[in-house]
Amino acid sequence: MSEALRCAVIGFDFGHQGAFAGSFVKMPEVTIVGVADLPNASDEARARGRDFAERTEVAYFDNYAELLAAQAIDMVSLCIAPERNPDVVEEMCGRGIHVMSEKPIAADTAGTERIAVAVRASGVKFTFGFHAARFTRPVARALGQVRSGAVGEVRVLNAMMLQSRGPRYTISVEEAKRRKTSGEPSVGELANHGGYAFLAMRAFAGAKARSVYAETDAFFYESYQIAGIDDMALVSIEFENGVIGTATVGRTTTKSLPNADSRYEVIGSDGVLHVDFAHGDRMFVWGDYRDDDEYNRGGLDMVNFSPPSYELYCEDFVRAILDDRDPELSVDDALEFDAFLSAAYESARTHQPINLRAKH
């Protein structure tokens, strides 16, 4: 394909869209042709969308249908609520538009399966937003080492994916009560961040998950307790080749650095590999202390010296389209994560291990 891919940016419901769409702006293989929202988008989402459109000097549309009518589109960066996602993805597939979707891709298994059916029937490329699972340079290097046999036969995996600055990003008590009263779904942290740990461990193991045991709860936030969602989870996974993995996933109350505590340990027959900071190559540098922001007080700054995972993730998606191959994170990975997540929450309810083969 000689011309640049024509990309639509739809939905700014979540902050990741700024990173994804901003990455495409930098890529010569991509041209942003318009920004749009869903008809029922929030005022906050519309404000973010209009701001991005103004900064990138492209048209903004209140309704994404107007953008689809106005422009020929090759690909879309989609960042809307999980319960709305299947309908929009199905429409994109029907038009032959390649889809990059924010995570979680659906509110339930039925929605995920609808997306898989549409993607497979249309033949479009599809990927979803767990970019830190395999695209950070530390994880990618570790995967290369494991796949080359550096640790021998993989036996045991350990993972930690803890998001800090929780009070800044959690929902309020008032919002939790509103959602509970209206019946609007909320997403717990195992669904929100567990994909990073699971999809990385799946790649390290080199096999599908066979069974899952999980414990989840809301330890830190009253709003999560009201909404009935988890802020912490401990998960044990047995993979089909006998590899055993354990993951701790959650959102903590730590207010400042580091902005995430993400680590992996791969124990093999011939050695052990550690990834001490899986979110990227960073230097920790002392800096000036500020008292004006309790979440970014300084004193210690983290400086990246390799591309962020979201840029590498976006590059992989574009190359998948241009080279006519599957993205590193495909719709098959989305189905596997959904099966894992469903089993994990069932296990948390029943306090029993759940066999994935029995469920599917």
Image: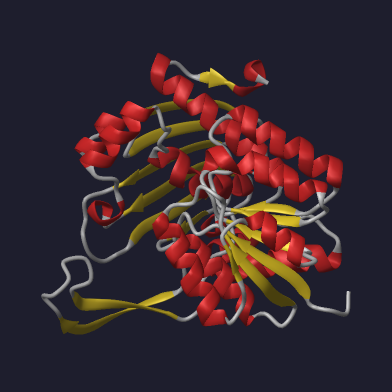
Please count the marks in the image. Answer: 0
Residue 1, quarter of picture: bottom right
Residue 47, quarter of picture: bottom left
Instruction: Out of 308 and 226, give the one closest to the viewer.
Output: 226
Percent position of residue 202, x then y: 60, 43
Tell me, yes or no, if residue 195 can be seen here.
yes
Percent position of residue 54, x then y: 52, 78
Instruction: Out of 28 and 151, give the one closest to the viewer.
Output: 28
**Residue 4 appears left or right of 139:** right
Who's the residue at 59% across and 62% down the image?
Answer: 36
**Quick check: 21 above or below 129?**
below
Who's the residue at 56% across and 32% down the image?
Answer: 340
Furthest residue in direction right, as rendered: 1
Residue 109, quarter of picture: top right
Instruction: Out of 313 and 212, give the one closest to the viewer.
Output: 313
Instruction: Out of 82 and 296, give the one closest to the viewer.
Output: 82
Location of the C terminus (image quadrant): top right
Tell me, yes or no, if residue 268 can be seen here.
no
Percent position of residue 62, x then y: 56, 60
